[in-house]
Amino acid sequence: MGDFDQEWRQSRSGAGDEQVHMRLNGTGAPAGPLAPGGSGTFGSTPAEKSAAANTIENELEHKTKTSTGHADEATNTAVKGFDGWDTAAGLKKLADTWDKQVKVLMGRLGSEKIALRGAYGLIVRNDIDLGDQFRPIGRSKLHGV
């Protein structure tokens, strides 16, 4: 019989000796907003989400566009300077790749900005909907009887 079979038999025979305990009160569970004993808060506040969206819009998108413009100008100047050389073709290909990557980055920044702003709206609408579920629908005829 192989070493594996012998080792497996020993492991299985010893497994019954160990006691396994499980507690349902959250002891040993990882802490988190939804875990027992967790903070009960989201990872960020609506104000933080709004601030992050504003940073994307006012800083990251703006600076990315500005930097791209500077890089395009410098690359176009270099391409003209190397006209007729293989280097010019390489720089042009590099510039085209760069422009595609910038377009993808700008799309991603825009998506993240929209998602951050949308998350706030979803949370507020969810809170309002839950609140509406707890409000009485109307006064009962039995009220005051």
Image (spheres, helix red, strand yellow):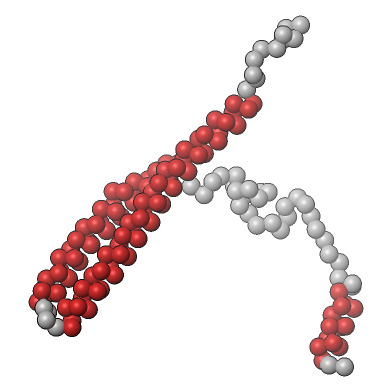
* In front of the other: 43 or 67: 67
Residue at image coords 23%, 62%: 68
Q: Residue, x 11% and y 81% (percent of image)?
A: 84
Is 14 located above or below residue 103 in the figure?
A: below
Residue 142 horizontal/vertical position (percent): 74, 9
On screen, residue 95 versus residue 32, left or right, reads left
| Front one among 52 and 141 | 141
Can the viewer see residue 48 in this picture? Answer: no
Residue furthest bottom as drawn: 1
Residue 11 at x, y percent in the picture: 84, 80
Indicate whether 29 appears above or below 95.
Answer: above
Of the 4 image quadrants, the one containing the N terminus is bottom right
Residue found at the far top of this picture: 145
Above or below 44: residue 91: below
Q: How many marks?
A: 0
Name which quarter of the figure residue 104 lies in: bottom left
Residue 130 appears at what percent x and percent y? 60, 31
Specify the quadrant that holds the C terminus.
top right
Is residue 78 left or right of 65 when viewed as pictured?
left
Residue 44 visible in the picture: yes
Residue 85: percent from left, percent from top: 14, 83
Q: Which residue is pictured at 66% across the width and 12% down the height?
A: 139
Q: Residue at x 85, y 87 (%)?
A: 5
> In this orientation, which residue lies closer to the viewer: 89 or 103?
89
